[in-house]
Amino acid sequence: MYLIQQEPSPVPLHFRGLIKDDTLIQLAGMYPLSMSKIEKQTSNPRIAPGVIFVGIVAALSSIWFKTNTQDPFNLPKFQVLIILTPLALYFAKFRVNVKLEQKQFRILMTFLAIFIIAFINASLTSGNIYLSFIGLYQRNLGFFTYFCFVILFVVTLLNLNINNWKNLVYVYITLASFEIVYGLVQHFGLDPNNWKSPYSPILGTFGNPNYQSAFLGVAASVSIGLIFLCGKSLKVILVIQILCSLFLIQASNSSQGFMSFGIGASLILLFQTKIRSPKMFIPGAIVIGITAVVGVLGLLNKGPANALYQSSISARGDYWRAGFSMMNSHPIKGVGIERFGDYFGAYRDLTQVRNRSYATYSDNAHNVFIQFGATGGVPLFVASLLLWLLVIYLGFKKLQKIDGRELQVLLTFIGGFIGFVAISLISPENIGFTVWAWIFAGAICGISLHKRSDSKVTRKATHGVFVKSLVAASVMIIGVMPAIFLTQNLNRADQGIWNSLGVAYRGTGTLEDLLLSIKTNVSFAPNEQRYQALAASVSLGLGQNALAREYSNAILNLNSRSIDAYKIMAVSYEKENRLEDAINARLKYLELDRYNLENLDKLSRNNLSIGNKEQSLAYLDSMKKIQAENPLVISLQNDLNSQG
């Protein structure tokens, strides 16, 4: 690795009278105390297997993708996360941080417990248990994912301290280096994977240029913090890494990377200014404050930094208003975990429709706290907000009590964590990205709550082989094996659907074989409504209208608020000229989204076709109130006028 300079050479203990006490604390544990009767100490307190393992789990969750599945990025990351995370529980039992600030630790665990209880309560009462636990297709942000995040957070907290923090940083910086190299490969058109993206070819391993950009922004800010902790030769490497990250952020056409970098780096540099030149702290804070205001205005397409503006950012306000409306209407349990998209049509307003288009939907609030509030109610909203505020409070409180190297290490983690959280305020969470926010939070708490033992020796509790074997076996049976079984079926379904759609698009194979293949693949994950929707859509395209309705009914059995199901049913009936049945399906659609002009247009035309012109005109009037200048409204008006 290439990150941190070597520690000072060890000094024999018989020279301890010539050395400061804090140096003895650092050296303690590197030499056995021959006359001590205490338990055998750790051979190297700077090596923490638990920290290394957590870092590897997070890194694999960020990197892992597959090229032969319908969802090549999110589902593979979900599989890695829920299979490997239970193994981390082994290190929660055999931990490094034996002594913690007990009062603060109990408060933190209480907040964490409230978050979990609120989350699982909303999941169990959501009306779609599978969706709430597994998560929405191509996001997978259900209870299982966040429970894994919590486990990694706790294991990091229990194992990371000021002696072994490098174990985590080595893994993180190695991952960042990989993402930089892969980003450059994509930028220069050398990627062997032919990803198709309408935004930017720089997807990294996250499958989205925004997350790739944001991750590199955080990595660059962390590298700035590490520059103050390493030797001159390593500084050069870190500077190169920072420059490459900023280049890729610019090339990705995503301003989120500059946002995460600016926030994290500014915080780190501001505190470094306070340490090295206290008189410059206030002027530095003012400069950073002004820069932040200009940056925010730029994101809103105002001021001199309007180059930061992206049209997608302006849509956030539409999603946030809908989210707050859901939370206001369902304050206790929300609309259901991962069900934002099911209710968006009912809670969006005319401003969103007129500014963005009636066809623009969202399945996420694009703000983690509003998303929690909308889908899990006020309890989950408050619990998630207070948990992160507590982490930040503990970190800054510790900063006031420490100095030197320890302060710089903690400050680097805080800067990275706040960079991660800042992105979650304007974007949906992403498994490969968000997992690092939870681990950095655990690192902050691990350093902040760690208490050195009175004997100034890092001790290691002894455990028998039987106890360790029992813990390992329990973890495998309770956590890993069920996760493997679940993900194996999901993978079979996703890969099978991908193959079936390929056959359908290429037009190869017989119709009977194709339909049988789709049916078989859907059966591997019968509770995943997206597979049912894909099957219904393909069946409709192949002229199998009755089969399309069969799949649509299967969707409605899973989710009675599925707009896709009602739309497919309506189209299938319209193809058979069963207009009254089509109207009934579209009326169900209308209950879920009163502003969809296309649906209102079809309702008007279907009523006109069966001779109900009065009702047809009523739907036209509704469309005019929504957006009179829309081409659909104008076309319908002309057609009705031509009818006399």
Image (cartoon, rainbow, N blue to C red):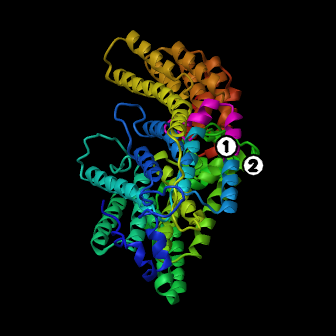
Taking the image as shown, residue 617 lies to the left or right of residue 358, namely right
Q: Image quadrant for the C terminus? A: top right
Q: Position of residue 41 (x, y in %)?
A: 48, 58
Q: Relative to residue 208, is residue 250 depicted above or below?
A: below
Mark pair 2, 1: CA separation: 18 Å
Q: Residues within 10 Å of mark 1 (few under 14, many from 20)?
A: many
Tell me the quadrant of the picture where the N terminus can be found: bottom left
Where 85 sits versus 32, above or below? above
Among the two numbered marks 2 and 1 on one chain, the one whose residue lies closer to the N terminus = 1
The label shown at residue 135 is none
Residue at point 30% right, 69% down? Answer: 234
Taking depth in this image into account, of 566 and 623 the one nearest to the observer is 566
Magenta highlight range: 116-141
Which residue, as the protein is rendered here, is positioned at the far top? Answer: 512
Q: Look at the picture and state if 479 lies above or below 92.
A: above
Residue at the location (54% across, 77% down)?
289
**Rendering quarter of residue 254:** bottom left
The residue that label 1 is drawn on is 119
Mark 2, residue position: 328
26 shown above or below 386? below
SS of the residue at dot 2? helix
Instruction: Work out which residue is located at the far bottom of the displayed protein and give it.
Output: 279
Image position, residue 553 (x, y; %): 60, 19
Q: Nearer the viewer, residue 528 or 444?
A: 444
Amino acid carrying mark 1 in the image: Phe
Q: Amino acid at mark 2?
A: Asn
Q: Image check: 436 left or right of 65?
A: right
Secondary structure, mark 1, is helix
The answer to whether residue 361 of the structure is visible from this angle is no
| Magenta-drawn stretch contains 435 | no
